[in-house]
Image (cartoon, grey):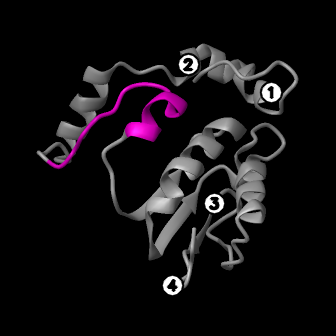
Amino acid sequence: MPKPPEDSIDARLYNFPQLIEANHWAVDLETVKTNFQRYGLLDKQVQFVPGWFADTLPQVPIERIAVLRLDDDYYQSTMDILNNLYPRLMPGGYVIVDDWGLDQICGEKQAVIDYRNTHGIVDEIFEVDWQSVYWRKGLDSDV
Protein backbone atom coordinates (compact mmCIF):
# COMPACT_ATOMS: atom_id res chain seq x y z
CA MET A 1 0.00 0.00 0.00
CA PRO A 2 1.30 3.46 -0.77
CA LYS A 3 1.93 5.77 2.15
CA PRO A 4 -1.05 8.11 2.55
CA PRO A 5 -0.92 11.75 3.65
CA GLU A 6 0.02 11.96 7.34
CA ASP A 7 -3.11 13.88 8.34
CA SER A 8 -5.56 11.61 6.49
CA ILE A 9 -7.88 8.99 7.91
CA ASP A 10 -5.97 6.46 5.80
CA ALA A 11 -2.86 7.09 7.89
CA ARG A 12 -4.67 5.36 10.75
CA LEU A 13 -4.90 2.18 8.71
CA TYR A 14 -1.37 2.49 7.31
CA ASN A 15 0.02 2.75 10.84
CA PHE A 16 -2.12 -0.09 12.22
CA PRO A 17 0.28 -2.57 13.93
CA GLN A 18 -0.99 -5.64 12.06
CA LEU A 19 -0.64 -3.87 8.74
CA ILE A 20 2.92 -2.84 9.52
CA GLU A 21 3.67 -6.43 10.55
CA ALA A 22 2.28 -7.64 7.19
CA ASN A 23 4.54 -5.18 5.33
CA HIS A 24 1.50 -3.16 4.23
CA TRP A 25 0.19 -6.19 2.30
CA ALA A 26 3.10 -6.13 -0.14
CA VAL A 27 2.98 -9.21 -2.40
CA ASP A 28 5.19 -9.88 -5.39
CA LEU A 29 3.65 -10.66 -8.79
CA GLU A 30 4.87 -14.27 -8.85
CA THR A 31 3.07 -15.01 -5.57
CA VAL A 32 -0.14 -13.53 -6.99
CA LYS A 33 0.19 -15.64 -10.16
CA THR A 34 0.87 -18.76 -8.11
CA ASN A 35 -2.25 -18.14 -6.03
CA PHE A 36 -4.38 -17.65 -9.14
CA GLN A 37 -2.97 -20.86 -10.60
CA ARG A 38 -3.56 -22.79 -7.35
CA TYR A 39 -7.28 -22.06 -7.59
CA GLY A 40 -7.55 -22.68 -11.33
CA LEU A 41 -8.06 -19.00 -12.11
CA LEU A 42 -4.99 -18.34 -14.24
CA ASP A 43 -5.86 -18.47 -17.93
CA LYS A 44 -5.34 -16.35 -21.04
CA GLN A 45 -8.12 -13.95 -19.97
CA VAL A 46 -6.29 -12.92 -16.80
CA GLN A 47 -4.04 -9.91 -17.21
CA PHE A 48 -1.95 -8.52 -14.37
CA VAL A 49 -1.28 -4.80 -14.26
CA PRO A 50 1.34 -4.14 -11.59
CA GLY A 51 1.63 -0.68 -10.13
CA TRP A 52 -0.34 1.92 -8.20
CA PHE A 53 -3.92 2.54 -9.32
CA ALA A 54 -3.22 6.18 -10.18
CA ASP A 55 -0.43 5.12 -12.54
CA THR A 56 -1.97 2.05 -14.16
CA LEU A 57 -5.74 2.47 -14.36
CA PRO A 58 -5.85 5.38 -16.83
CA GLN A 59 -4.19 3.14 -19.45
CA VAL A 60 -5.60 -0.27 -18.48
CA PRO A 61 -7.03 -2.01 -21.56
CA ILE A 62 -10.54 -2.64 -20.21
CA GLU A 63 -13.54 -1.39 -22.16
CA ARG A 64 -16.50 -2.89 -20.30
CA ILE A 65 -16.95 -4.13 -16.75
CA ALA A 66 -19.82 -6.20 -15.34
CA VAL A 67 -18.69 -6.31 -11.69
CA LEU A 68 -16.46 -3.73 -10.02
CA ARG A 69 -15.26 -4.88 -6.62
CA LEU A 70 -13.50 -2.32 -4.42
CA ASP A 71 -11.20 -3.49 -1.64
CA ASP A 72 -8.51 -0.85 -1.67
CA ASP A 73 -9.09 0.83 1.69
CA TYR A 74 -7.77 4.30 0.93
CA TYR A 75 -9.72 7.40 -0.06
CA GLN A 76 -7.49 8.33 -2.99
CA SER A 77 -7.13 4.76 -4.23
CA THR A 78 -10.91 4.42 -4.24
CA MET A 79 -11.26 7.67 -6.17
CA ASP A 80 -8.62 6.49 -8.66
CA ILE A 81 -10.59 3.29 -9.23
CA LEU A 82 -13.97 4.97 -9.50
CA ASN A 83 -12.76 7.78 -11.75
CA ASN A 84 -11.11 5.37 -14.14
CA LEU A 85 -13.33 2.27 -14.02
CA TYR A 86 -16.86 3.25 -12.99
CA PRO A 87 -17.55 4.90 -16.36
CA ARG A 88 -16.68 1.53 -17.94
CA LEU A 89 -19.16 -0.33 -15.72
CA MET A 90 -22.07 -1.42 -17.88
CA PRO A 91 -25.55 -0.21 -16.94
CA GLY A 92 -27.01 -3.00 -14.84
CA GLY A 93 -23.52 -3.93 -13.57
CA TYR A 94 -22.65 -4.18 -9.91
CA VAL A 95 -20.29 -2.36 -7.57
CA ILE A 96 -19.26 -4.26 -4.44
CA VAL A 97 -17.48 -2.29 -1.72
CA ASP A 98 -15.47 -3.96 1.03
CA ASP A 99 -14.43 -2.21 4.26
CA TRP A 100 -17.59 -0.06 4.34
CA GLY A 101 -17.82 -0.56 8.10
CA LEU A 102 -14.20 0.43 8.70
CA ASP A 103 -14.77 4.11 8.05
CA GLN A 104 -13.02 5.08 11.29
CA ILE A 105 -9.66 3.88 9.97
CA CYS A 106 -9.93 3.98 6.18
CA GLY A 107 -11.35 6.43 3.67
CA GLU A 108 -12.92 4.01 1.18
CA LYS A 109 -16.51 4.66 2.30
CA GLN A 110 -16.14 8.44 2.22
CA ALA A 111 -14.61 8.29 -1.26
CA VAL A 112 -17.57 6.25 -2.52
CA ILE A 113 -20.01 8.72 -0.97
CA ASP A 114 -18.13 11.70 -2.45
CA TYR A 115 -17.91 10.10 -5.91
CA ARG A 116 -21.59 9.22 -5.92
CA ASN A 117 -22.55 12.74 -4.80
CA THR A 118 -20.30 14.41 -7.38
CA HIS A 119 -21.76 12.31 -10.20
CA GLY A 120 -25.37 12.31 -9.03
CA ILE A 121 -25.47 8.55 -8.50
CA VAL A 122 -28.61 7.69 -6.57
CA ASP A 123 -28.76 3.92 -7.09
CA GLU A 124 -29.73 2.28 -3.80
CA ILE A 125 -26.90 0.90 -1.67
CA PHE A 126 -27.59 -2.51 -0.10
CA GLU A 127 -25.73 -3.84 2.94
CA VAL A 128 -24.22 -7.31 2.65
CA ASP A 129 -22.97 -7.39 6.23
CA TRP A 130 -21.44 -4.93 8.70
CA GLN A 131 -18.45 -4.44 6.42
CA SER A 132 -19.68 -4.68 2.82
CA VAL A 133 -22.24 -3.05 0.54
CA TYR A 134 -23.19 -3.12 -3.13
CA TRP A 135 -25.30 -1.30 -5.66
CA ARG A 136 -26.46 -1.96 -9.17
CA LYS A 137 -25.66 0.71 -11.74
CA GLY A 138 -28.88 2.15 -13.14
CA LEU A 139 -29.86 1.19 -16.67
CA ASP A 140 -30.23 4.87 -17.54
CA SER A 141 -26.91 5.96 -16.03
CA ASP A 142 -24.84 8.56 -17.85
CA VAL A 143 -21.71 7.99 -15.73
Q: Find out whether residue 94 is within the magenta segment.
A: no
> Looking at the image, can residue 74 be seen?
no
Mark with earlier residue (1, 2): 1
Discs 3, 1 touching: Cβ within 8 Å: no
C-alpha separation, residue under disc 4 versus residue under disc 1: 37 Å
> In the image, what residue occupies the spot 71% across and 56% down?
115
The boundaries of the magenta stretch are 45-59
Q: Position of residue 64 (x, y in %)?
A: 35, 62
Name the residue located 39 percent from the left edge and 38 percent from the top edge: 59
Q: SS of the residue at dot 3? A: loop
Inter-mark Cα distance, 4 to 2: 41 Å
Q: Which residue, given by chain and number where applicable, does mark 4 sit on?
A: 139
- Residue 1 in view (yes/no): yes
Up/down of 120 relative to 115, above or below: below
Disc 3 versus disc 1: distance between alpha carbons? 20 Å
Residue that badge 2 annotates? 22
Circle nearer the N terminus (4, 1): 1
